[in-house]
Amino acid sequence: MASGPKRLALCLLAGFTLAVPLACEIHPASAREIDTRGDLERFISHIQEGYKRVANANALVSSDESKSASQSTRKPGSAKGPYYVDFRARTAASWGHAFVWFGKTSERAVEVAGLTPAGDNVPYVLGHLMWVPSETGASYGDLDPQYLTASYRVYLNEPDAKRVFAYIKKLQASSPVWNAETTNCTAFIGSIAEFMGLKVPHRWQRPENYVNSLKAMNDGRQMIRLSSEQ
């Protein structure tokens, strides 16, 4: 439908162009005929310009419709919240270590929480027999990606993040001892996951396996919303 008027204008121009040489054989073209041809060319130019504008407008509408269609096909609940808790595991001299990163997605700085025996090797060895003093902040290797063996990150909105972060701080303050069998690193991050409403695996496994099991048990769920009871 859009090519009809344009084709008609071109036909008129072609017919007029053929008529000019025939008229020249009889007598020279008059000034009025020259003006008429100029008016016709300007008329055709206006028509062509109009169709260009229509084509550009149609292309813009099609682009906007494609964007809208793409946005409407996004999976519900796939949006990420502005805050996160990242359950992580890393290598260590013996068993490995489980801990969490938490913070704001728009910021590079992270906070680290985990449960480790305070000091060097001796407290770690004694911690297999008794409770020993603990540390609950970042330990060596927690911020180094080359030591990472597993990760499961979940996202939170701001109100839920405030509650979860407050719980992590409280757990840090109330965990003065470490023991390899009971109050260990996997039990520590498991308490955080359980508070967030996640399904939690048993604590007696390697930190890497623990984090991977945590992710699998929750089907890799990314967005977490706390219930009113939490």
Image (cartoon, grey):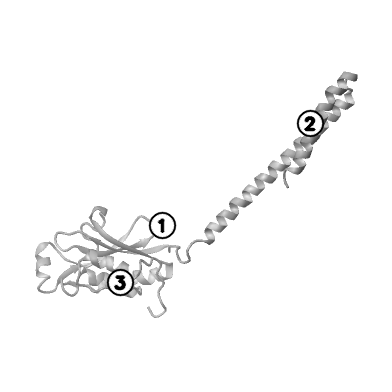
Q: In this view, does 130 lie to the left or right of 143?
A: left
Q: Which of marks 1 and 2 is in front?
A: 2
**Amino acid beneath label 2:** Ala
Q: Which of marks 1 and 2 is nearer the N terminus?
A: 2
Q: Element under label 3?
A: helix
Label 1 sits on residue: 106
Quarter occupied by the C terminus = bottom left
Residue 170 seen from this side: no
Quadrant in the picture for residue 145:
bottom left
Depth check: 15 or 86 in front?
Answer: 15
Tag shown at residue 192? 3
Number of residues whose C-alpha sits closer than 10 Å to that of mark 3, classed few (under 14), some (14–19) or many (20 or more): many
Q: How far apart are marks 3 and 1 (CA)?
A: 22 Å
One can see residue 56 in this view: yes
Which structural element holds mark 2?
A: helix
Q: How crowded is mark 1: few (under 14 residues within 10 Å), some or many (20 or more)?
A: few
Label 2 belongs to which residue? 14
Q: Looking at the image, is 34 positioned above or below residue 182?
A: above
**Cβ–Cβ under 8 Å for marks 1 and 2:** no
Q: Position of residue 173 (x, y in %)?
A: 26, 72
Residue, x 36% and y 62% (percent of image)? 103
**Residue type at tag 3:** Ile
Q: Which mark is residue 189?
A: none
Three-letter amino acid code at the position of disc 1:
Ser
The residue that appears at 26% across and 65% down in the rendered structure is 99
Real-space CA distance between mark 2 and mark 3, rounded to the nearest whole angstrom:
82 Å
**Image quadrant in which you'd find residue 36:** top right
